[in-house]
Amino acid sequence: MSANPHLSRRGLLGMTAAVPLALALGGGTAHAADSAYAMVYFTESTKLGDGTDYGLHLAVSPDGLDWTPLNQNNPLVTPTAGALGLRDPFLMRKQDGTFVVLATDLKGTDWNYNSQYIHVWDSADLRTFTGYRRLKLHDMATHSWAPEAFWDAGRRQYAVIYSSVNSSGHNVIMVNYTTDFVTASAPQVFFDPGYDVIDGDMAVGVNGYNYLYFKKNQTLVGARSTTLNPGSFTEFSTGVAHGGTEAPTLVKSLTSGTWWLWGDTYTPNGVFCAWQSTGLASGTWTALDQRTYTQPVNSKHCGIAAITAAEYDNLLAKWGAPAWNRLKSYNHPSRYVRHSNYLGRIDAYPVEPYKDSLWTLVPGLADSSGVSFRSVNYPTRYLRHYDYALRLDANDGTSVFAADATFHRTAGLADASWSSFRSHNHPTRYIRHADYALRIDPVSTTTERQDATFRVGY
């Protein structure tokens, strides 16, 4: 059954009579009609300033790789108890087809704040969030970090796993069992390999195995077991990392046998990285080309679940796509178009201040069939060329400025699924980067075509 294309990120567990035409998953239930994904996350800028918000954020994707943040990348709900903020949100479709959200009770980076509780919301459709409460997990003088859940069919209960320091003196993965996410059983140690581990993420019932990925030192490592019993998992995989990496998230492709492993890096800070594998049994992963995926701006420690096409459409209708865009470089896909000291350039994500990389694409000032790039944080200024270099200038209302700030979007010169931008008043020249600075130049070589190709996204 693990080859079924309609799996959520938690993997198959078995059939359930409670949800017709559906599959019961490790993290909940995936409908046979699932064809898209939803992501929950919080936001944190590298300087903990503008762009940081410890509320619940939501994004959607048709393919699990290219994400559209909803509600202008603003939170949908924020905790009203405990630390009054969250980290590490997790999203799961329950056995009855509705959703539950779990999150760490922590605002900011006060790692000495110890909460025995986690935040919980219910949601029928991810358009409303109800029943907010905190679920108590233990009485220990320690934290309850990165809660996640999966359905344990043998116990007919949900298992809530999370990181805490127990009598061992180091972080272990704990587990409590619940039927309603209102009350829970006493805690047990779920996984203690004898060293510090946090951020457990499960894929259940994949070809006879259950998989647990977690952070070990600065890498993401997997363990597996043929049962879901606490203490039964054994480490087996090759570790992966991009700098210091945490927050593993396993995602099953809805259209192939591919698995993805998302990781959240903190050196460099704030970057999602993704790896892929043709099967979890191998325990090996290959890094994905950054051209193939994006993350919501400033997003941290995500949780991903499969949704239907109708749910995807309804979420976009309810919350809306951003009114702004980001432009990713084709041949430097870790870099985005931004302004710095009023000059146009491409810089590595994350950009500070992040709004320097946000653009409102408006009808061309000189020709409405073209496009002009208006700065989000300097809305009277536009990208325009001057002596062929791109810079951010205030619109002076002249026809010369309008022409300099107007470009015609074409199929990408290096990849037709991306975009290139031809100058309105110098039609043999295109926007391209050279030594990371933006300018308009004639384009003829393979490298120049790549320099002049961008992905317009969020």
Image (cartoon, helix red, strand yellow):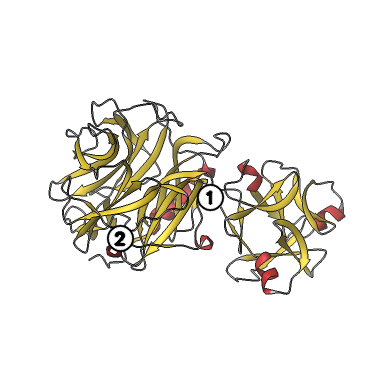
Query: Is residue 429 visible from the viewing direction of this image?
Result: yes
**Mark 1 crowd level (few <14, some 14–19, many ≥20, 10 Å Cα):** some
Mark 1: amino acid: Ala
Tell me the residue that label 2 is attached to: 7
Mark 2: amino acid: Leu
Q: Residue at x 79, y 56 (%)?
A: 389
Relative to residue 346, is residue 157 depicted above or below?
above
Point out residue 235 in the picture as x, y percentages from the top left corner: 26, 53
Q: Is residue 410 left or right of residue 120?
A: right
Point out residue 159 in the picture as x, y percentages from the top left corner: 21, 43
Image quarter of residue 34: bottom left
| Residue 321: image tag | 1
Q: Residue at x 31, y 63 (%)?
A: 6
Q: Secondary structure at mark 1?
A: loop
Q: Secondary structure at mark 2?
A: loop
Q: Is residue 276 left or right of residue 366?
A: left
Task: Give yes or no for contact between labels 1 and 2 (Cβ–Cβ under 8 Å).
Answer: no
| Closest to the observer, 322 or 13 | 13
Relative to residue 344, is residue 369 depicted above or below?
below
Q: Residue at x 37, y 45 (%)?
A: 217
Q: Residue at x 35, y 63 (%)?
A: 254
| Closest to the observer, 56 or 343 | 343
Point out residue 27 in the picture as x, y percentages from the top left corner: 27, 50
